Image (cartoon, rainbow, N blue to C red):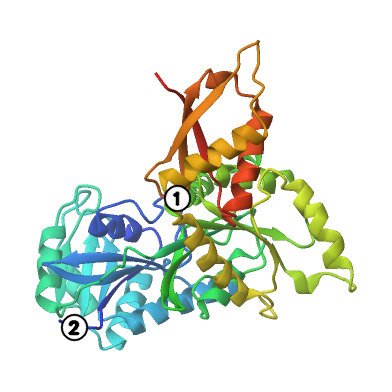
Amino acid sequence: MNNKVPIVAIVGRANVGKSSLFNAIIGRREAITSSEAGTTRDSLTAKASAGGKDFWLVDTAGLKSAEDEFELTIQEQISEAAAAADIILAVTEADTSITDEDRRVATMALKSRKPVVLLVNKADKAAVDTDEWRRLGVKEIFATSATQKTGLDGLMAYLAGELPPARIRRSSEVIKVSLLGRPNVGKSSLFNALARKQQAIVADRAGTTRDVNRAAIRFEGREIELMDTAGIRRSGKIERGVEQFSVLRALAAVEESDICLLLMDANELNVQLDQKIAGLIKEAGRGLILVVSKWDSVDKDAFTHDQLSPQIAANFDFVPWAPLIFTSSETGQNVAKIFELVVEIHEQRQLRVKTSELNHWLRQVVNDHPPAGLKNRQPKLNYMVQEENEFPNFKVFGAHTKFLHWSYKRYMERKFREQWPLTGTPLKFWFIEKH
């Protein structure tokens, strides 16, 4: 079995259906698809398989002239993806004639000296004259329709015959970490610093990252998958269409994650939306690290850190268990420390407590401070068990538990963390009537 997993890159001009083909090949919605040209900016990578042979499928932005430095960065990523690929899928569309951009795509692909396949997409809209498309110089041509799923069987059979045998083995111990926050708080810069390579596009404009961008790295023998997400705006500020899907994708990344890094710009602290995002992460039961980014850009003295930390802690008093870290992607300050926290939190989330230990703790807590209850109903807490879950989750059985005051639940959590700290992760008590 080949150790090197081959790469198949999808290239083409804007709006020919590359992302739809990407989704059709991997069998799920991963890339954002839209009729708006230029939707895909970062190069997306996902696992795919043909004839039992695994490969990495890369979706790239639409090829066009680089009008500014930002656009040039996108075009460079396309070139890099093509250079790294073992097979290039050049995409055009059936319902238009050959354009100058199609010729540029074909020329770039053929210059790489890699096997090139021409996909004439949207074949459900127009008949495909293969002889006409051969003028681009590509021998292997498939007429496809991503929406109708036609022509894909032939493509997958071709890939199965051309690709070397390879398997992508993903450990069940992979720690999934997402970077979340408002637009332009430095998520992509930190993502690049953590991944130690130029994986996401970094630009000083809001809304650069629209898809969830991923990178897998190893730290102290652990595999960590990083996910860079689109910026989350206040609901009234979200534009309809592509950006709306991007925010939904970011929120879906929370559900997929084990641990979330909530980034806050050091120059714009105490923003209510940051607290709302932290609340979403807590409710989802995910680990949380509060990350103050762009620390190098702040005018500070020796006491600034000590002054800000209590202020931030007060704003996030509903997640007192979340560690706070000040970072700079420019200087690298505390970037490595994030990995140490991720591993520590991951281990805390694996906590499993014996039922006998839990009930000894429960008796001690109740004896020290019996629950008062409401409406003259005295709650009784009899025993508890830990649920099999991806984060610490406990069922507490008793009588009249619905009359238990919220302050007592907070007291229980505080006492629990005194014995089992659970750094960086929420815990959940479910109170259940014994009958």
**Residue positioned 48% across, 28% down in the render:** 382
Left or right of residue 196, residue 110 in this image: left
Residue 422 seen in the figure: yes
Residue 88 coordinates in the image, percent (x, y): 27, 76
**Residue positioned 68% across, 50% down in the render:** 320
Residue with the mark numbered 1? 353
Q: CA distance from mark 1 to mark 2?
A: 42 Å
Residue 342 coordinates in the image, percent (x, y): 53, 65
Residue with the mark numbered 2? 2
Residue 272 coordinates in the image, percent (x, y): 73, 44
Q: Are marks 1 and 2 in contact (CB under 8 Å)?
A: no
Compared to residue 422, the image places residue 65 above or below, namely below
Residue 144 coordinates in the image, percent (x, y): 19, 58
Residue 45: assigned label = none
Q: In the picture, residue 17 is in which quadrant?
A: bottom left
Q: Secondary structure at mark 1?
A: loop
Residue 68 seen in the figure: no
Q: In the picture, residue 369 is in which quadrant?
A: top right
Crowd tier of the residue under label 1, counting other residues whose Cα lies within 10 Å: few below 14, some 14–19, many 20 or above: few
Compared to residue 290, the image places residue 5 above or below, namely below
**Residue positioned 61% across, 49% down in the render:** 417
Crowd tier of the residue under label 2, counting other residues whose Cα lies within 10 Å: few below 14, some 14–19, many 20 or above: few
Please tell me which of labels 1 and 2 falls first in the chain: 2
Q: Secondary structure at mark 2?
A: loop
In the image as oriented, which residue stretches furthest toward the top?
Answer: 376
Disc 2 residue type (three-letter): Asn
